[in-house]
Amino acid sequence: MRKLLTALVALGLFVVPLRAADAADTGEPGKLVFADEFDGTAVDRAKWAIHSNAEGDQCLGNKGNEQLEWHTWDALSVSDGKLTMTARKNNPASGYEWSGALITTGQACGHDPSQAFAVQPGDYVETRLKLPAAKGFWPSTWTWNGSGSNEQDTYEFYSDNHQALYLTNHQTGGGQCAYQSPTDLTADWHTIAEQLGPDETVWYLDGKEVCRQGAYAGSGALILDLFVYSKIPPEVTSESMQVDYVHVYRP
């Protein structure tokens, strides 16, 4: 389904974001149509599920995609206005040494949240997060329509390399970039965003454009995850990342 990107061209910072809508009066890139500020004490199960039909093993694991983890609710906690996603080497299921985290707004194998949500062309997807530092982990934010034909990766991060973000439009004619940061991306909080077309897809890091590729069509559930990467297995027995918020704006 999702493969490690190769032969990618590193891009530098470009310009102030060209956002989805003329929202000069509000300073926002459109109308807020989905948001989670993680202000409660647990993940909102009306918005999120942990099952996904992107995961081939009972919708909770996917060793065929270079993942070592089994997704559990215990891998997710909410406090102080933040979601913590934690991977642990705790033998959560037969054949899996690692538990890990995935939350999705739909395509959840019959476990869809009551307020299921799908992104559309023109949407602006934004997450503020703090990435994991220990090597062996593979977090990302992406869209999934059930087949992967229009998957969009707001970002992928392989934690053995603290300066690289991988940004991909998986549609035919889409395109991909590797952004090389001048600083350690795990050292601070960052806002990573993606404008999903409709004419082209544009990515932003902390408000600066870092990639521009092909158009987005169709729709798909929004997924956030903390995978455990089988090609570079962790040397630690647990690691976490944090998410401050998830926003989706629509023109």
Image (tube, rainbow, N blue to C red):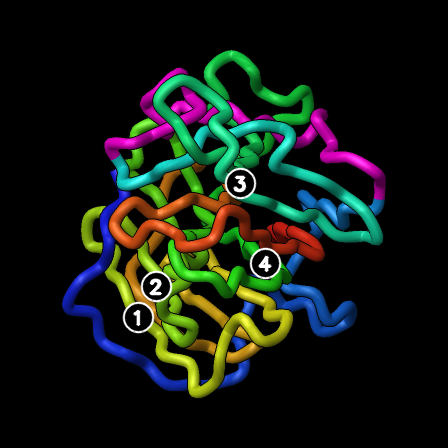
Toward the viewer: 2 or 251? 2
**Of labels 2 and 3, the one closer to you:** 3
Mark 4 or mark 2, earlier in chain: 4
Residue contact at pointers 1 and 2, CB within 8 angstroms:
yes
Image mark for residue 178:
1
Residue found farthest to the left = 7
Toward the viewer: 206 or 200? 206
Disc 4 marks a residue whose amino acid type is: Glu
Mark 3 or mark 4, earlier in chain: 3
Q: Is residue 205 visible?
A: yes
Task: Name which residue lies at 32% across and 81% down.
Answer: 11
Tell me the CA gap for discs 3 and 4: 27 Å
Q: Which contiguous range is marked in magenta?
A: 40-64
The quadrant of the picture occupied by the N terminus is top left
Disc 1 marks a residue whose amino acid type is: Ala
Query: Which residue is label 3 attached to?
Result: 88
Residue contact at pointers 2 and 3, CB within 8 angstroms:
no
Mark 1 or mark 2, earlier in chain: 2
Location of residue 173 in the rendering, given as x and y in whole percent from the top left corner: 20, 54
Disc 3 marks a residue whose amino acid type is: Arg
Crowding at label 3, few (<14), some or many (≥20) Cα neighbours within 10 Å?
Answer: many
Tell me the CA gap for discs 4 and 2: 16 Å
Q: Secondary structure at mark 3?
A: strand
Location of residue 136 in the rendering, given as x and y in whole percent from the top left corner: 38, 54
Image mark for residue 64:
none
The correct choice, above or below, for 175 with respect to 17 in the image is above
